[in-house]
Amino acid sequence: MLTRACLVLLAGSPAIASELPMGAMAEDPQVSEVLVRKEERRLYLLSGEQVVRSYRIGLGDNPSGHKLFEGDQRTPEGEYVLDWRNPNSDFYKSIHISYPNKQDRELASAWGLDPGGSIMIHGLPNEAGDMAFAFLGLDWTDGCIAVSNEEMDEIWQLVADGTPITIVP
């Protein structure tokens, strides 16, 4: 999982990572982990302890705090796995985050609530069309992590199923 040194490095100041077009890289980096820092609205692709890519993200409409139940419009926090993908989702491609885990289910159950599910990294709504620009840089999802369609293509190419993802406040 993510090393303490990498968390400290990223916590000190926003990391500056390569955001060159994929064609500008000699070869694709080997992504070992994904890190999301909600407060920064950034998603980082890591190769070991090195940040190899960085993206501006949109979160749920109510982004502060850990997701507690279906419909709270929060993006979960914790350690998960990117476990499967959908090329034909309601959004431009999507990669599933393994939320809810055992602790998430227990927490929601203690409150008598459904933890929800279907938390994804995805592109823009398929029907966005000429209004795609209006989504970028805003928190608009129901708890997912959104990037531009071009960025989703890059993430889709670089991140394999089974890659760990850590989501921190």
Image: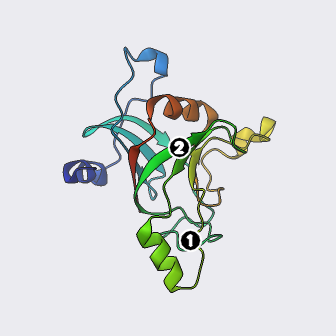
Q: Residue at x 60, y 75 (%)?
A: 114
Nearest to the observer: residue 32 or residue 86:
86
Residue 87 in the image: state x and y as whole percent.
64, 35
Residue at x 65%, y 70% (from the top left corner): 71
The C terminus, quarter of image: bottom left
Question: Which of the 4 image quadrants contains residue 37?
Answer: bottom left
The residue that label 1 is drawn on is 115
Q: Residues within 10 Å of mark 1 (few under 14, many from 20)?
A: many
Q: Amino acid at mark 1?
A: Pro
Q: Position of residue 46 (x, y in %)?
A: 33, 39
Q: Which residue is more in the foreground, 116 or 48?
A: 116
Q: Nearer the viewer, residue 95 or 151?
A: 95
Q: Residue at horizontal 34%, vertical 29%?
A: 30
Residue 7 vs residue 95: left or right?
left
Residue 84 numbered tag: 2
Q: Disc 1 or 2, which lies upstream in sequence?
A: 2
User: Is 49 located above or below residue 119 in the figure?
Assistant: above
Residue extending farthest left = 5
Residue 64 drawn at (x, y percent): 51, 68
Give the left or right position of residue 54, taking residue 143 as reference.
left
